[in-house]
Image: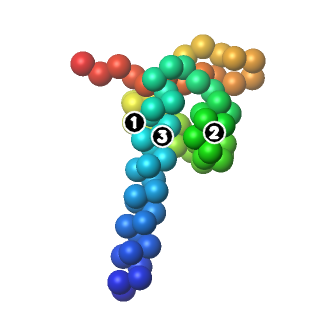
């Protein structure tokens, strides 16, 4: 049981680090490949996080850059 708890805690820590790194990149509108390149997180993982952040209203689509949308943080007041 201790191993399962430790593994879950490690996954949660990694998820929080990934979300923080992605949000830092989204201070300016960026595409998923740009975020992946800057953070070192695989594109498929970045896309998954961006989709989740968009679903919960933390990220929105900005303009389109070729085939990719740029994403940015939603301003909160």
Label 1 near label 3: C-beta < 8 Å? no
**3 or 1: mark nearer the eye:** 3
Q: Secondary structure at mark 1?
A: loop
Q: Position of residue 47 (x, y in %)?
A: 60, 40
Reply above or below: 45 against 28: below
Query: Who is closer to the viewer here, 46 or 51?
Result: 46
| Marks 3 and 1, how far apart at CA | 18 Å
Label 1 near label 2: C-beta < 8 Å? no
Which residue lies at the image location 36% right of the left edge and 86% below the top edge?
A: 1
Using the image, tell me which numbered label, if any, was put on residue 6.
none
Using the image, tell me which numbered label, if any, was put on residue 21.
3
Query: Who is closer to the viewer here, 58 or 41?
Result: 41
Which residue is under mark 2? Answer: 36
Q: Residues within 10 Å of mark 2 (few under 14, many from 20)?
A: many
Q: Residues within 10 Å of mark 3 (few under 14, many from 20)?
A: some
Using the image, tell me which numbered label, if any, was put on residue 56.
1
Which residue lies at the image location 45% right of the left edge and 23% below the top edge?
A: 27
Which residue lies at the image location 35% right of the left edge and 19% below the top edge?
A: 75
Q: Position of residue 41 (x, y in %)?
A: 60, 46
């Amino acid at each position: 049981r201790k191993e399962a708890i430790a593994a879950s805690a490690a996954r949660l820590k990694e998820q929080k680090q990934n979300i923080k790194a992605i949000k830092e990149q989204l201070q300016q509108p960026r595409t998923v490949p740009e975020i992946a390149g800057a953070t070192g997180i695989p594109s498929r993982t970045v896309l998954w996080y961006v989709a989740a952040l968009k679903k919960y209203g933390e990220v929105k689509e900005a303009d389109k850059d070729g085939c990719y949308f740029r994403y940015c943080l939603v301003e909160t007041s």
